[in-house]
Image (tube, rainbow, N blue to C red):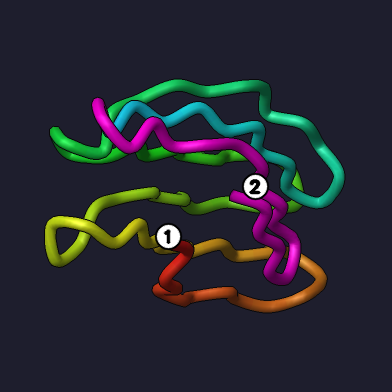
Amino acid sequence: IDFSFGPLHVKGYVNPQTLGLTVTVDILGINLGTLRGNLKNSGLTIKVSLFVVKGEVKLYLKNTNEVWIRLHLEVTFDGTFDEDVKLL
């Protein structure tokens, strides 16, 4: 996975056998770290509450075999980013 949209950049991978997920997340150039989760359960949700950006990003499984990202981010100086995008 290597995805950018607005203030968000996500890079990482999905293990196709276990549906384990490892991603590095940057918002407005601020690295939130490397996060791990499993798409099989409820996916991976990252809640953000920083000075210039608030909201959440969720990576999840849709239609049993598609990896999607849902983002709802409100950036103080750049508006709202509210999208669902298929990654894989």
Determine the image quadrant of residue 30: top right
Q: Image quadrant for the C terminus?
A: bottom left
Disc assigned to residue 69:
1
Q: CA distance from mark 1 to mark 2?
A: 10 Å
Left or right of 17, for residue 80: right
Judge the density around disc 1: few (<14), some (14-19), many (≥20) Cα neighbours within 10 Å.
Answer: many
Q: 61 and 75: which one is in front?
A: 61
Expressed as whole percent of the image width and height from the top left, the position of residue 67 reads 35, 57
Left or right of 62, for residue 69: right
Question: Which tag, 1 or 2, sits closer to the chain's start?
Answer: 2
Disc 1 marks which amino acid? Answer: Ile
Residue at figure coordinates x 22%, y 57% from the top left: 65
Disc assigned to residue 10:
2
The answer to whether residue 36 is above or below residue 11 is above
- Secondary element under disc 1, as helix, strand or loop, is strand
The answer to whether residue 43 is above or below residue 34 is below
Task: Read off the magenta span.
Answer: 1-18
Q: 45 and 16: which one is in front?
A: 16
Expressed as whole percent of the image width and height from the top left, the position of residue 63 reads 14, 66
Magenta segment includes 28? no
Outermost right residue: 29
Expressed as whole percent of the image width and height from the top left, the position of residue 64 reads 13, 57
Left or right of 29, for residue 53: left
* CB contact under 8 Å: marks 1 and 2: yes
For the stretch drawn in magenta, the main secondary structure is strand
Q: 18 and 42: which one is in front?
A: 18
Disc assigned to residue 17:
none
Judge the density around disc 2: few (<14), some (14-19), many (≥20) Cα neighbours within 10 Å.
Answer: some
- Secondary element under disc 2, as helix, strand or loop, is strand
Residue at figure coordinates x 59%, y 76% from the top left: 80
Residue at figure coordinates x 59%, y 65% from the top left: 74
Determine the image quadrant of residue 66: bottom left
